[in-house]
Amino acid sequence: MISKSIFRTISLALPTYAITAGVSMAEAPFPIPDTMQSACYGETQEIICPAPGEAFYGQDAQHLGPQQSYTDNGDGTVTDNVTGLMWVQTPDLNSDGVINIDDKRTLDEALAGAETFDLAGHLDWRLPTITEMYSLMNFNGIDPSGLEGNDSSSIRPFIDTSVFDFGYGDTDAGERLIDGQMASSTRYVSGTNATKDDTLFGVNFADGRIKGYGLMLHGQPKEFYIMYVRGTEGYGVTNLTDNGDGTVTDTASGLMWAQADNGEAVSWEGALAWAEEMNAQGYLGYDDWHVPNVKELQGLVDYSRSPDTTDSAALDPVFEISAITNEAGEPDFPFHWSSTTHANFTDQPGTFGAYVSFGRAMGFFGGVWTDVHGAGAQRSDPKIGDAAEYPEGNGPQGDAIRVMNHVRLVRDAD
C-alpha cells in the first residue's frame, strides 16, 4: 500500500517534431506518449546504449516519442499534456489516505460510480478504454517477478508516481503484490476467457501488462482499482490511410507503418537487426524505420476484432499479418515484438521483451492450451532460450512462451 501523495505541479516542455506526410506527431490529434524507458538492454542485462551497426541498436530508449508530461491541477485531478485527457489522481476512492482492497470495485460498480462521480466540479467522468488507460504506462517500472516476500521498496510501478498515486495489491487482505489491476471499459470481443467468464481488459501498473481478466473470481465478481478519466473521446482510435506503396499512415497518432510484418518469427535481437537491415535497403522507400515501442505497437490493436469473432487478428484489415499454428494446434496470428524491455527483479533484469498479441494470448490452464488473456493482450517473452523448455507455459496462467516472434516496422510519418 502507498499513501496518497502531496499535490504538486509537473508541466514539462514537449519536444518539437518535424512535420511529415501531412501530419506530424506534434500535430496528430491523438499522439502516443513515450514509454519513458531510459535504459538499454542486451539479452539479459542493462548495457551501454549501442551505436549504429552494433548488436541491439535501435531499441526503445534510442527512439524518443512525445515525452510524458503531466500537470497536477491541485484539485485531485491530473491533466496529461500529450493526450489532453484529465485523470483522477488517485485510486483511493474512499479517501481514507491509503490505497487498498476497500477502494476496489466490480465492473458494474465502476460504471455506475462514474455516472455520479463529482470531482473538481466535473461531472463527465467515465471509465477509460483500455488504450486510454495504457497511455499512462511507464516502462521505467520493475516487474515484481523474482521478488520474494511483500516488500515493494525495491521495485517500481509502471506509472509516474511523482504525480499519480499508486497501490500494489493489498497483501494484508490476502492479495498478491501484483494484484493492482486497473479496470477499463473494454471487454474482450470474444466474450470469455479460459474459465469461461466474461472478460474485461485491464492494465496492471504493478507488473506492466495488459491482460483480459475474467469478471468472476472464486465465485464472486472480480474487483479492480479504478481511475476515472474525462476529456475528448476517441483517443486510441486509429485513422488509417493505405498509401498504396506497402505503407499505412495513422493520422491519429502521426505514425507510418509497414503494411506487412516480416513474415517469420525471430528473436528480439533479430527483430532489431532486421529493422537496421531494412533501413540499409531503403525498405518501402524509407531508411528511418524502427521496431515500435510497446505503446506504439499496442496503438495498432483493434479491440473490435479477434480470431474467434471475425476470423482475423485484432488488427485493421488494411494490414497484412502472418498466419501461425498456436500451441493448441489452431490457426492463429503471431505475437509481435516491441523494442521495449520488460525489466524484472531477477539477477537478469533485461531477459524479457514486451510483445503484443494480435492473435490469441495463449496459456496452459486447467491442463489445456487456451486463450487465457485475449487478442490485444500485452505480455513479455524471453529474448533468448528455447520455447521447448516451457511445455506448460510460464506463470500462474501458464502464459505461452515462444521466444521467437514476428515484427512490424514503424516510422514517424512524413
Image (cartoon, helix red, strand yellow):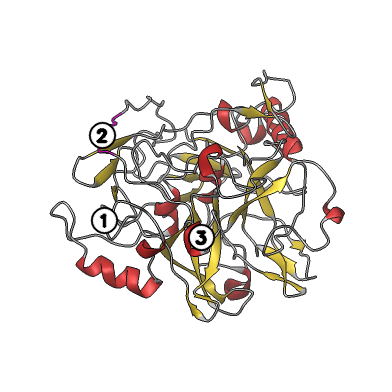
Is residue 399 a member of the stretch shown in magenta?
A: no
State the residue at coordinates (36%, 64%): 102
> Predominant secondary structure in magenta?
loop
Q: Position of residue 93 (x, y in %)?
A: 29, 59
Name the kind of residue labelled 3 in the image. Asp
Residue with the mark numbered 3: 302
- Residue shown at 53%/33% (left/top)? 37
Placement of 117 over or under 54, stated as above or below: below
Seen as rendered, the residue at the extreme left is 121
The residue at the point 64 percent across, 68 percent down is: 372
Asked if the residue at tag 2 contacts the one at tag 1, i.e. Cβ–Cβ closer than 8 Å, the answer is: no
Q: Nearer the viewer, mark 2 or mark 3?
A: 2
Q: Which residue is mark 1?
A: 95
Query: Closer to the N terminus: mark 1 or mark 2?
Result: 2
Q: Callout 2 environment at 10 Å: few (<14), some (14 to 19), or many (20+)?
A: few
Calculate the distance from the C-alpha at mark 2 to the C-alpha at mark 3.
Answer: 36 Å
Which circle, 3 or 1, is nearer the viewer? 1
Amino acid, disc 1 = Ser
Q: Residues within 10 Å of mark 3 (few under 14, many from 20)?
A: some
Q: Which residues are magenta?
A: 6-11
Please give left or right for residue 81 compared with residue 320 in the image. left
**Depicted 127 relative to depicted 74: above or below:** below
